[in-house]
Image (cartoon, rainbow, N blue to C red):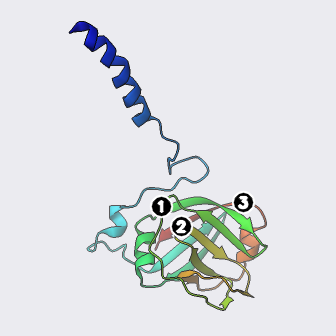
Amino acid sequence: MKQTQMLLLPLLLGFLSTLACTTDDPMNLENPIPPAGNTAATNPGNPNRSNRLRIRIGTDTFTATLLDNPSVEAFKARLPLTIVMKELNGNEKFVDLPTSLPTSASNPGAIQAGDLMLYGSSTLVLFYETFQTSYRYTKLGRIENSTGLAAALGTAKITVTFELE
């Protein structure tokens, strides 16, 4: 009996160590994204059910109006959210979220500066230039006044905070 216990102990410790060590932690240093299910944003009786989004970039703050769709509800459940967004094509900042959101993608034809969209099911995109596109996106919302957005975002990686008003 004691010999069986001695053989099982290393197996048990090995199994437990694989459970404790995971590499897909959404709370990494570069993109500290809280998990879905933030009760402050998902509780229907909570006043934080607003469709107005505050976007903080350095010392600048922009206000966006969110649409009313399942993608936005899933996005709001993750708020507040502080992330590092990467530069792409001289017209947008993006970040790959650790989990997918519901989608309803369509081709908008034209992207407007200030559009907040989802590319695929997990790439959050904030556009700071207006241009034509052939890509499909799920619309989340739009910044009400995008004056100064391009300057605030700059041309490199940037930390952006999204929170409900």
**Residue found at x 58% / y 68%:** 123
Q: Residue at x 70, y 86 (%)?
A: 133
Q: Amino acid at mark 1?
A: Thr
Q: Amino acid at mark 2?
A: Ser
Mark linked to residue 9: none
Question: Pointer 2: residues within 10 angstroms few (<14), some, or many (20+)?
Answer: some
Density class for disc 3 (Cα within 10 Å; few <14, some 14-19, many ≥20) is some
Q: Which mark is residue 99?
A: 1
- Residue 14 vertical placement versus 161 (above, below): above
Residue position for label 3: 157
Callout 1: 10 Å neighbours few (<14), some, many (20+)? few
Residue 103: x, y in percent?
A: 48, 77
Under circle 2, the secondary element is loop
For the residue labelled by badge 1, is the local secondary structure a helix, a strand or a loop? Answer: loop
Q: Residue at x 51, y 58 (%)?
A: 98
Query: In front: 23, or 151?
Result: 23
Q: Is residue 165 left or right of residue 12?
A: right
Task: Give the left or right position of residue 108, taking residue 100 as reference.
Answer: right
**Residue 143: percent from the left, percent from the top?**
59, 82
Q: Earlier in the sequence, mark 1 or mark 3?
A: 1
Residue 158 sits in quarter: bottom right
Looking at the rendered structure, the kind of residue marked 3 is Lys
Badge nearest the viewer, 2 or 3: 2
Labels 2 and 3: the sequence-earlier one: 2
The residue beneath circle 2 is 122
* Image marks 1 and 3: residues in contact by CB distance under 8 Å: no
- The quarter of the rendered structure image containing the N terminus is top left
Pointer 1 and pointer 2: residues touching (CB < 8 Å)? yes
Residue 90's quadrant in the figure?
bottom right
Q: Residue 140: horizontal and vertical position, in percent?
A: 52, 80
